[in-house]
Image (spheres, helix red, strand yellow):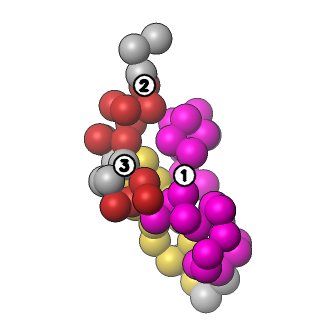
Amino acid sequence: MLEILRMTGDVAITAPPDQSLIWRTLLECEQEGWLVTKQINPTLWKASLTEKGRALAKGPY
């Protein structure tokens, strides 16, 4: 997830927050401080990397 965000910038999510794999992953990353999610409207959320997440996604390569 972090690599996708690093390569593309912000990502829009249209699926509502639930127990789907995408939301479990987003919430786990958010809890670690690697990304933030923000609800844009009733059916759209945005995921963005934090500086901590950008540094982690950059990796040693």
Q: Quadrant of the N terminus?
A: top right
Circle 2 sits in a helix, a strand or a loop, which is it?
helix
Which of label 3 and label 1 is nearer to you?
3
Mark 2 or mark 3: whose residue is earlier in sequence: 3
Residue at the image point whose x is 42% and y is 54% from the top:
29
Q: Residue 17, can we see it?
A: yes
| Residue interval drawn in magenta | 1-27
Q: Is residue 25 magenta?
A: yes
Q: Which residue is mark 2?
A: 58
In the figure, 6 relative to 10: above or below?
A: above
Q: Which residue is mark 1?
A: 10
Query: For the residue marked with disc 1, what is the amino acid?
Result: Asp
Residue 44 visible in the snapshot: no
Give the side of residue 44 with respect to residue 55, left or right: right
Image location of residue 16, percent across then percent down: 65, 80
Graded by Cα atoms within 10 Å as few (under 14), some (14 to 19) or many (20 or more), the crowding at tag 2 reads: few
Residues marked 3 and 1 touching at CB (< 8 Å): no
Distance from label 1 to label 2 (Cα)? 16 Å
| Front position among marks 1 and 2 | 2
Q: Which mark is residue 22?
A: none
Tell me the residue that label 3 is attached to: 34
Marked residue nearer the N-terminal end (1 or 2): 1
Q: In the figure, is residue 51 to the left or right of 59?
A: left
How far is mark 3 from mark 1, CA to CA? 13 Å
